[in-house]
RNA sequence: UGCCCUGUAGUGUAAUUGGUUAACACGUCUGACUCUGGAUCAGAAGAUUCUAGAUUCGAGUUCUAGCAGGGCAACCA
């Protein structure tokens, strides 16, 4: 009776939020944001961040903005903007109001930069990029101050205006903050605030030829939007002093957004870097961003993942600052948990072998009733034709079975799910190759599913389809993209590409029960005893294509694996 | 060698904020049940809480010193 309630503990960010709430900080407002750069597709790591920032807002009655961090026009594109919006909605989240863009704030950011110059805290530097980099020094040694560091305010103002007006070519000048060239934090060694890029921006067009850097844009954007908790991944930890510094220069009053960092998601057998995902696409290792093997949200969607399963995964994985590698099998567990509840069951034989039921009348067809989903009593039933010639899975028969093999073998009985109990009487083999061409059986008419005679104990139940009624479908069997848990673990001279799994996609033609003929793209099924599958977007009524989302757990496979 | 962050079963996350027997989930192993070798149910194994000191009646939690891992030296975000 007592102590059965498991109190859901808070993660460290929720603790901070609740403490801020207790202290009445920001008038008890909670406002987060998700700030993707539109230069690639969202992946499951972003899904974690999305669930966090939107989830915190939901939980504490706050708001969450979507803001495109579009300060670098040369890598960014509207194609990505659209996909990002779609993916967030698909995951089940809605941002507050309209989507925001850092580029919406370019005017304000510029004015603040001018203000900074007037305060003597920023200067135009015409040192080359290489020299600036060299002068910044190394972490263990202080940097060297630029010769431009002590220009007059007037000179800086004039130069900055001319930068803005397009008088200088790309890369010839930057605006730098004047902070501390000997800071142990490299980011405080007079960071670049603006650079010249004569590039067309996807939103502001040709209005600007100078663009703010991340550090000069991000905190200010948070500030403008009234963000209270700005959640980001660990690599921005060292930026926080700069984030705070920038805000202190421009902020009036007490309000400050607060940056909090958490550890990014890593999953074994998986890569998450945008650069590498792009390489997989560009070099043709996968068919596109939404290839079902990709960890992108659109790839997972096409693979058959559900938003629920991804949200549950993000919740279960938790939030902390410690580096982590989640097991891919855990993601799959979260997936199965949901699919088990919602997927309609059907029978599909992927590697068929013919069964002849010798004592079943030729030409006779019976209609069997099959439960659509034992986990959902409202799912109803469907009809399955039964006849004299059937297909079963080749793996479900063994001529000379080992001890723990419970399925069909000569002299043994097996139950055909929703059908009859059959007894194997023999096999017909190709005389030359020895390959089994047909399995001979007899059926017991009293054991039809639902009849009393069927209540007999039989060791195993297998799936089947009626040969004359079955339809051919294309099935794409997907497996993990990499052969190594850590794709970076490579021999001398090789790179992560060499760890790509050559068997990550196998395409087969399978025999499906006729009820599947009307399957529509996106629909999710459980092929009984095999796995979860969804109808691919390339599928059509005449030519069905299924993607294997994930296999069912398979204890038999575990047993056989152990014997080797 | 500078600065910052992080070290808790195989994996991830907890631990009433210094309180006694370190919890939960996944995984692993047993068993039960089953017209999916799925699902479900019951149980078990598995941790010197990175190490060594210190403070304390009491330390996973505080302090010091080490060690290990990660991050930081883009006109990327």
Image: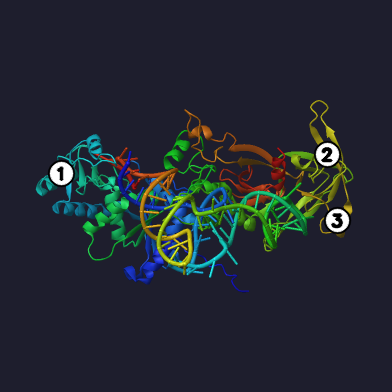
Q: Nearer the viewer, mark 1 or mark 3?
A: 1
**Which x, y percent locates residue A510?**
69, 41
Residue A2 image position (x, y, % from top left): 60, 74
Q: Whole-Å distance between the Cαs marked 2 and 3? A: 23 Å
Question: Pointer 1: what residue?
Answer: A149
Q: Label 3: which residue?
A: A456
Q: Is residue A199 visible?
A: no
> In this view of the protein, which residue sits in the foreground, A454 or A86?
A454
In this view, the residue farthest toward the top is A432
Q: Is residue A464 left or right of residue A247?
A: right
Q: Quadrant of the C terminus of chain A?
A: top right
Q: Which residue has dot 2 on it?
A: A439
Residue at image point 85% right, 56% down: A454
User: What chain letter is assigned to the residue under label 2?
Assistant: A
Q: Are marks 2 and 3 on the same chain?
A: yes
Residue A323, horizontal then vertical, whole percent: 45, 49
Residue occupying the far bottom of the picture? A1
- For the point 83% across and 44% down, the residue is A388
Residue situated in front as seen by the camera: A134 or A71: A134
Mark sitting earlier along the chain (1/3): 1
């Amino acid at each position: 009776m007592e102590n059965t309630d498991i109190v859901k503990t808070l993660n460290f960010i929720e603790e901070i939020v609740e403490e801020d709430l207790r202290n009445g900080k920001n008038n008890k407002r909670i406002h987060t944001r998700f700030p993707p750069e539109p230069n690639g597709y969202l992946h499951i790591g972003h899904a974690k961040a999305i669930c966090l920032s939107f989830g915190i807002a939901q939980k504490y009655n706050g708001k969450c903005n979507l803001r495109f961090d579009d300060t670098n026009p040369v890598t960014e594109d509207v194609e990505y903007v659209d996909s990002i919006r779609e993916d967030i909605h698909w995951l089940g989240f809605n941002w507050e109001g309209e989507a925001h863009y850092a580029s919406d704030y370019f005017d304000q950011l510029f004015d603040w930069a001018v203000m900074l110059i007037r305060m003597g805290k920023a200067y135009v530097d015409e040192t080359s990029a290489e020299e600036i980099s060299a002068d910044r020094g190394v972490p263990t040694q202080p940097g060297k101050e630029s010769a431009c560091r002590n220009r007059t305010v007037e000179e800086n103002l004039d130069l900055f205006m001319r930068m803005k007006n397009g008088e200088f070519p790309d890369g010839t000048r930057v605006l730098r903050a004047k902070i501390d060239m000997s800071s142990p934090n490299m980011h405080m060694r007079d960071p670049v605030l603006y650079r010249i890029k004569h590039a067309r921006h996807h939103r502001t067009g040709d209005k600007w030829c100078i663009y703010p850097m991340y550090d000069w844009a991000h905190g200010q954007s948070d500030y403008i939007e009234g963000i209270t908790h700005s959640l980001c991944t660990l690599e921005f930890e060292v930026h926080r002093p700069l984030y705070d510094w920038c805000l202190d220069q421009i902020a009036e009053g007490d309000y400050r957004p607060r940056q909090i960092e958490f550890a990014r998601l890593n999953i074994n057998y998986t890569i998450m870097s945008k650069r590498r995902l792009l390489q997989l696409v560009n070099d043709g290792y996968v068919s596109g961003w939404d290839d079902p093997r990709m960890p992108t949200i659109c790839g997972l969607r096409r693979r058959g993942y559900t938003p629920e399963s991804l949200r549950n995964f993000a919740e279960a994985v938790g939030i902390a600052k410690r580096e982590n590698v989640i097991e891919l099998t855990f993601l799959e567990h979260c997936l199965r948990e949901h699919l088990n509840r919602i997927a309609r069951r059907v029978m599909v034989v992927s590697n068929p072998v013919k069964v002849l039921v010798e004592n079943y009348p030729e030409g006779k067809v019976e209609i069997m009733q099959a439960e659509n989903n034992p986990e959902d009593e409202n799912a109803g039933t469907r009809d399955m034709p039964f006849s004299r010639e059937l297909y079963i899975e080749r793996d479900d028969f063994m001529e000379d079975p080992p001890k723990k093999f419970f399925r069909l073998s000569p002299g043994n009985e097996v139950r055909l799910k929703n059908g009859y109990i059959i007894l194997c009487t023999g096999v017909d083999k190709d005389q030359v190759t020895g390959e089994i061409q047909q399995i001979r059986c007899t059926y017991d008419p009293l054991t039809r599913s639902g009849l009393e005679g069927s209540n007999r104990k039989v060791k195993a139940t297998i799936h089947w389809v009626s040969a004359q009624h079955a339809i051919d479908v294309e099935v794409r069997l997907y497996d993990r993209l990499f052969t190594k848990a850590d794709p970076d673990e490579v021999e001398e001279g090789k790179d992560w590409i060499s760890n790509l799994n050559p068997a990550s996609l196998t395409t087969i033609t399978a025999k499906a029960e006729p009820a599947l003929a009307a399957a529509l793209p996106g629909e999710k099924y459980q092929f009984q005893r095999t796995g979860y599958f969804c109808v691919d977007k390339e599928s059509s009524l005449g030519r069905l294509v299924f993607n294997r989302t994930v296999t069912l757990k398979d204890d038999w496979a575990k047993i056989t694996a152990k014997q080797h």
